[in-house]
Amino acid sequence: MKIFTAAQIHELDNYTITHEPIKSIDLMERAAKTITRAIMDEWTDRTPMVIFAGPGNNGGDSLAVARLLAEENYKVSVYLFNIHNKLSDDCAANKQRLIDSKRVGHFTEVTLNFDPPELTEDMVVIDGLFGSGLNKPLIGGFASLVKYINQCPAKVVSIDIPSGLMCEDNTYNIHSNIIRADLTLTLQQKKLSMMMADCQKYIGRLRVLDIRLSKEYIDKTEANCRILEEQDVIRLLMPRDDFAHKGAMGNALIIAGSYGMAGAAVLATRACLRSGVGKVTVHTPRRNYLVMQTAVPEAVMQMDHEETYFSESVDSTDFDALGIGPGLGLVENTAIALIGQIRRTSCPIVADADALNILANHQAWMQQLPSGIIMTPHPKEFDRMAGSTSNNDYERLIRAQQMAEHIKGYIILKGHHSALCMPDGHIVFNATGNSGMATAGSGDVLTGILTALLARGYDKGTACQLGMYLHGLAGDLAAKEVGKESLVASDIIQFLPKAFLKLED
Ligand SMILES: NC(=O)C1=CN([C@@H]2O[C@H](COP(=O)(O)OP(=O)(O)OC[C@H]3O[C@@H](n4cnc5c(N)ncnc54)[C@H](O)[C@@H]3O)[C@@H](O)[C@H]2O)[C@@H](O)CC1
Ligand SMILES: Nc1ncnc2c1ncn2[C@@H]1O[C@H](COP(=O)(O)OP(=O)(O)O)[C@@H](O)[C@H]1O
Ligand SMILES: [K+]
């Protein structure tokens, strides 16, 4: 699914109106019918509905919804906020339709003072104050109304987007003046702010409603951000040749683990082996030998000279991909070995965990990264690499996007919706995965998967997309079996086969 900007959404509406063609008021009616059905799915006609409508088309939508609900025998009260005595054409038309229908129990047009109604637990508030046309934070009377709604015990449903929330950048927004919805019914496409963890408290549960906006526009319009879907990923899969032999299926090198963190190396190596690669070699400190040999008998061991840490870069000419970082530790000799390794490696590199922490500690090295490097930071690792803490998730995402462009590399900013920032500025969000994966070692598994896919011959952008999707999918399949609470990183590896099978089906 493409994520369009507010400006593109406006164009999409207009394109639909001129090319379908359909009158804008009829398009609003179509949207309102879809929204009404979604509300009726959730609440019966015994639930009193209180609708707050704004002066624009979001208000128009909600007035039409009020009329349609009233026609379905819901008890409906409506407050239309027309402070500046200026309604959009379709909002004004829907105000008239609502009055003409005579079905709505209570209708107040607020032009000056507003005496708020009592909102009780059994009611549902429908928030149609502002949608994608919001262009500045809410203040004054609207801000007071938002605060009033937010402190009421009723359930709140936002039409299109919680009023007060911007579609993209909320850095300078006034957070207390944004509706906190229980359910958001967004029209046609998700908005960028809906992908951000720190905006979830406003959005609540999210449903995307298809209001049949122009498919032609959606298909032909380039979007900078998109959400990865199963059909995209299935197209990326490479078939496995019947005559394949291990030499042609990729040779992966994993450099991971230090004394006390052999587990990270085990997880990355196991995940790598489960992701289609021909051969995996793991380079790790001597003391990890027994652990590794026992835990991952399929892997070739290459022991470091040092007992407890990675100390010297190794020849990687025979390898097709390198995964480096899980459990590496931060001692200075390891740092020097790491940068040496990055410099002498010509195959694709995935850098994760301590590899990223080391780079963050040596900012000069950040400027010398080879183009095409893949880095998989979680938010804290990213902030360390960026040398500054981001105030919010949007700001961090934009920094990651800029960094990926600057270093001409790939950055997977990990989270509930991991964001792959590509060297050309595009951002791909992952939609698989669940909170059960918020457990130690999950990231090491991703490193292993990515390394395998690169070694197997997938190009970098493809490996990143396929890798994060498979990782989340395996986590979702694991969660179904073991539950989110009990899920551990090894479960993700255990369910990788089923994740592959699901995509190959
Ligand atoms: N145009 C269309 O064909 C469709 C539009 N739809 C609805 O229309 C919405 C967008 O409608 P609009 O573009 O009219 O925008 P909104 O309804 O979000 O509001 C726009 C109005 O609010 C004012 N405004 C913006 N920020 C403000 C602030 N902080 N304080 C006070 N006033 C502020 C603007 O000047 C403008 O008059 C969507 O979210 C969706 O709900 C749907 O009906 C689908 C079809
Ligand atoms: N709530 C969540 N929803 C979806 N995926 C998650 C969630 N929490 C964590 N993950 C995934 O799990 C992995 C965690 O990686 P990371 O933080 O590096 O863990 P570790 O360092 O313990 O290996 C990431 O790929 C992330 O996307
Ligand atoms: K709204």
Image (cartoon, rainbow, N blue to C red):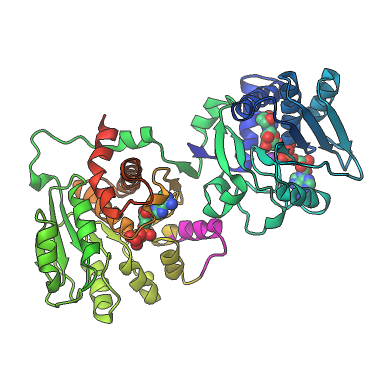
Q: Is residue 455 left or right of residue 68?
A: left
Residue 280 at x, y = what percent?
A: 14, 55
* Residue 421 visible in the displayed image: no
Q: Is residue 15 left or right of residue 360?
A: right
Image height of 105 relative to 226, above or below:
above
Location of residue 99 (image quadrant)? top right
Q: Is residue 331 left or right of residue 200?
A: left
Residue furthest bottom in the image: 332
Residue 144 at x, y = what percent?
A: 80, 52
Q: What residue lies at 34% left-to-right and 70% top-to-bottom?
A: 368
Q: Nearer the viewer, residue 259 or 335?
A: 259
Residue 451 at x, y = what percent?
A: 24, 54
Q: Which residues are magenta?
A: 389-403
Is residue 127 part of the magenta span, yes or no? no
Q: Nearer the viewer, residue 403 or 262?
A: 262
Quadrant position of ligand 2: bottom left
* Residue 481 visible in the displayed image: yes
Image height of 261 relative to 101, above or below:
below
Q: Nearer the viewer, residue 116 or 239?
A: 116
Residue furthest right in the image: 112
Q: Quadrant of the C terminus?
A: top left
Q: What residue lies at 9% left-to-right and 56% top-to-bottom?
A: 297
Is residue 402 part of the magenta span, yes or no? yes
Residue 111 at x, y = what percent?
A: 90, 40
Q: Nearer the viewer, residue 152 or 160?
A: 152
Q: What residue lies at 24% left-to-right and 54% top-to-bottom?
A: 448
